[in-house]
Image (cartoon, rainbow, N blue to C red):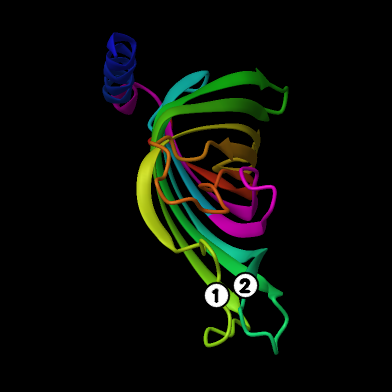
Amino acid sequence: MKLCYKLICFLVFSFLACTTTAQSSISLSTGISTDINNSNISSYQVPISLLWKPGGEEFSPLILLGYNFPLSGTSTGEAYTLNPALPAKVRLSEKISPYLFTAAIGFAVRLSKSKNNNSLYVNLLPFGICNQNINVNYKNYDKENYEILNPDVSRNEAAFVMAASVAYYFHKTKKDLIVMLQVQSGMIKKKDAYLLSYNSIAPLQLTFGYNFYYNKK
């Protein structure tokens, strides 16, 4: 707890110092994201990522805002019946649609800079909150004759997360092209009392966009 308190105080102090002493930038990017926390689900999303660096070239505090729209998410389930005239078990197609909103704070460290001012950064975001709204639907489910044992249900909850990314900036005069690979943990929370076939979403995403400078010095 003492270490977390010191890190938070350090980040707050860094934000206040950098906003008045160094150039600032805002990055906006989008791309493709997949879930690495559920091997039984084929899930993809379209992420939109906004990064604010209030200042500093080699080191800067960082704020991340991100939203993921579901592109696809499919799994399978089973339903059973006691009706002897029907098959005792049928396999169902399950659609899982996750909507994710993430807000995180951390810092960016420049690892290298080329002769033409292209830069490689690592972004560490140890303090974040993620809201995951996961909608679950079963296709072609005959509710009158079949029953799903322990069916998956939709979830809308928030918890702490951590994230990290590697970003490469292709330098231009007033803006940079940015390519970023980011991984985010699943939600850090107590174990669910109700057993589900899926866990919280842990997105691995590749995004492309632009980094815009302002208050440049």
From the viewer's side, name the closer residue of 191 and 106. 191
Q: Where is residue 211, by image quadrant?
A: top right
Give coordinates of residue 171: x percent, y percent.
64, 36
Q: Is residue 88 left or right of residue 54?
A: right
Q: Which residues are magenta?
A: 18-47
Q: Where is residue 110, by image quadrant?
A: top right
Amino acid type, label 2: Ala
Residue 182 visible, this angle: yes
Secondary structure at numbered mark 2: strand
Give coordinates of residue 127: x percent, y percent.
39, 29
Question: In whole angstroms, how far apart are the C-alphas of marks 1 and 2?
Answer: 5 Å
Give the quarter of the figure containing the N terminus. Answer: top left
Q: Which residue is mark 2?
A: 79
Which disc, if any, is residue 147? Answer: 1
Give coordinates of residue 178: x percent, y percent.
63, 42
Residue 23 shown in magenta: yes
Q: Earlier in the sequence, mark 1 or mark 2?
A: 2
